[in-house]
Amino acid sequence: MRIFSGIQPTGKKHLGNYIGAISQYVDLQDQGDPSIFCVVDLHSISVAYDPKEQRERVYDTAAILLAAGLDPERCIFFRQSDVPEHTELTWLLSSITSHGDLNRMTQFKEKSAKQRERVASALFFYPVLMAADILAYRTTLVPVGDDQRQHIELARQVATNFNQRYGETFVVPDWRIPEVGARIMDLKNPESKMSTTSENPAGTVYVLDEPKAIEKKFKSATTDSGSEVVRAPDKPGISNLVEILAFVTGSTMDQVEADFAGQQYGAFKGAVAEAVIEYLRPVQEKYAEIRPDEAALEAVLGAGAAKAQAIAGPIVAEARDKMGLGPTVG
Ligand code: AMP
Ligand code: TRP
């Protein structure tokens, strides 16, 4: 099994990223042959960004992943732009990716509608770059949160089309979406997923938030009418908190409901806050140790890039050759 996933260096990482993606990476790092994790800095330039801060954001994200427990001795961990095979393969794959399929991507529609500045064509091409990330390693399994399902479907389609047209080259990847925590919702607006770009900053808990801020956000979380701590379709706020508490305490959602039967919302929200603070504490402590040493972070990413390129290089060369590009091989 070959595992690959990517995470953007934009903004700060939030609890949804942590539960839905980062914790899966840590759990899966020994299970891949190998497991490969990538800070996708090329994806993040598809929306407005500050070039002066870009490297810093990569270090922030890399340090969070390492603090979470990713071990560069046990997996490959690198920065996307260090391995040019990703961009080359993007172009090759774009020739068999239909414009219509890209037009159907809901993330493109959402992100382009939200944007006030011009919409870059990179945003439209984003899913092709993501397909290239995955296919360049003949990945079999892609751990992600629920919002990436459609992009992985596209990558599967692109691999299938390529293999039909040019002969067996790429592996058609499967996704791995966790049963608990695949879609953590905004605390203020529990009908929307938690994200860095939400309207109300109090709805998003960041991995690096101070304990006091975390407590405040959970205590002011939108709850629903009624008074029972149970999941229900008309109780998205409480359902979300039940899911978060089950995840961070390693319990089940049924158990959480049983534990809080008969208790008030206020006590429940306080308990969720406390559990999340304790869950994030060791990550925050580790982050504070790791983040200042940028030279060490560069060394980790550089060594990872060399290992990644050793895998992607021959695969992309094979795709290029099958497409009739470059000199005759062999
Ligand atoms: P991004 O920060 O956009 O690169 O996302 C990194 C990972 O976090 C992806 O695998 C997403 O599917 C996952 N993710 C993003 N938001 C959430 C959320 N609210 N709940 C669970 N997973 C999420
Ligand atoms: N698009 C993904 C996200 O926003 C990040 C990503 C880029 C990714 N390339 C990938 C995820 C390859 C999995 C595999 O979350």
Image (cartoon, grey):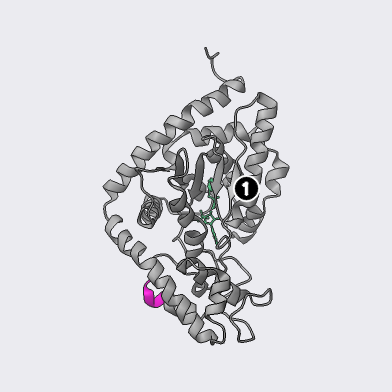
Q: Nearer the viewer, residue 284 or 115?
A: 284
> From the Cβ of disc 1, is ligand 2 less than 8 Å away?
yes
Image position, residue 250 (x, y; %): 47, 66
Q: What element carries label 1?
A: helix
In reply to whether residue 74 is colored magenta, the answer given is no
Q: Vertical placement of 234 versus 90: above or below?
A: below
What range of the chain is rendered magenta? Answer: 209-213
Q: Does residue 84 appear to the left or right of 69 in the view shown? A: right
Question: Do we see residue 187 in this rendering?
Answer: no
Q: Vertical placement of 70 versus 285: above or below?
A: above
Q: Vertical placement of 99 versus 262: above or below?
A: above
Image position, residue 143 (x, y; %): 54, 50
Q: Residue visible at 70% across and 38% down? A: 98
Q: Which of 60 and 246 is in front in this view?
A: 246
The image quarter containing residue 305 is: top left
List the single residue furthest toward the right: 100
Q: Vertical placement of 95 versus 37: above or below?
A: above
Q: Residue visible at 64% across and 86% down? A: 226
Q: How many labels does the image show?
A: 1
The image quarter containing residue 181 is: bottom right
Residue type, label 1: His
Q: Nearer the viewer, residue 119 or 12?
A: 12
Question: Do we see residue 319 in this rendering?
Answer: yes
The image quarter containing residue 236 is: bottom right
- Label 1, residues with CA under 10 Å away: few <14, some 14-19, many ≥20: some
Which residue was labeled with disc 1? 151
Helix, strand or loop: magenta stretch: helix
Image position, residue 32 (x, y; %): 47, 41
Image position, residue 134 (x, y; %): 55, 40
